[in-house]
Amino acid sequence: MEDFLYALTSGESATLDAKGVIVTLVSAAVIGLIISLVYLFTHKKEGYSQAFCVALILLAPIVGMVILVIGNNVATAFSLAGAFALVRFRSAPGDPKDIAFVFMSVTMGLTCGLGYWIWAFLATAVLCVIILVLHFSNFAGKKGDNYVLKITVPETLNYVGAFDECLKKYCSNYKMSRVKSVDFGALFEISFDIRMKDSSQIREMMDDVRALNGNLKIMLSTPESVVKSFHFQ
């Protein structure tokens, strides 16, 4: 208890040497760059944010420097905790894979800050290999392309079963997930979770649906985000 109070009130700082700081920052930055490059490679298809890729590079050296500054000084640790508590991050919930990459960058920065640079590089290499294996093997991926189909129909149309024949022709699986009224009840919007047999037939399916719903608005999107969107009015 006396040691804790002394550390809290003495204000002693962790001893920093230029060589250690440079090695920590450089090694952490290189590891962050490797992580960012792997993220870029595995997200070519779905797209990525430049700001997020840059953040992955910067997170590792920043965390490494924080660990160096804290050292064994309790007072500094409390001060930094208070400073970080003032920072608020406001963003939409991200993809779970993106969150995993953030934790990976932070963890490797922390490892470098503790002085385990070689272990940080080895751990990064192993984790990157695991990520690439999962990416190329399409682990837990479903066969076929899944979409959300939203069809606007007039209130006079009996939509129950109206699109079954069309969807059976182009989809290996489909299910009505939601129905809601729009335009003060003058129209209905029906949502289907569908799995296309062949994504190259999207245009043909949309044309057939248009013939059934009176040429009102139709939207097709992926379950995660609106990557492919078709609007017909």
Image (cartoon, helix red, strand yellow):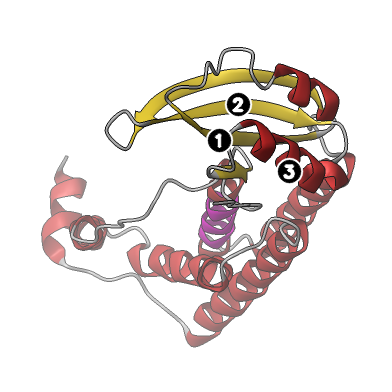
**Residue 112 appears left or right of 5:** right
Q: Position of residue 60 (x, y in %)?
A: 53, 66
Residue 133 makes an appearance in the image: no
Residue at image location 79% in from the left, 29% down from the top: 142
Identify the amino acid type marked 3. Answer: Asp
Q: Is residue 104 magenta?
A: yes
Q: For the residues labelled 2 and 1, say whether their Cβ atoms are less than 8 Å apart.
A: yes
Q: For the residues labelled 1 and 3, say whether their Cβ atoms are less than 8 Å apart.
A: no
Residue 194 drawn above or below residue 88: above
Residue 146 drawn above or below residue 220: above
- Label 1 sits on residue: 150
Residue at image location 53% in from the left, 42% down from the top: 216
Q: What element carries label 1?
A: strand
Residue 207 tag number: 3
**What secondary structure is the stretch in magenta mostly built from?**
helix
Identify the amino acid type marked 1. Answer: Lys
User: CA gap, disc 1 to disc 3?
Assistant: 14 Å
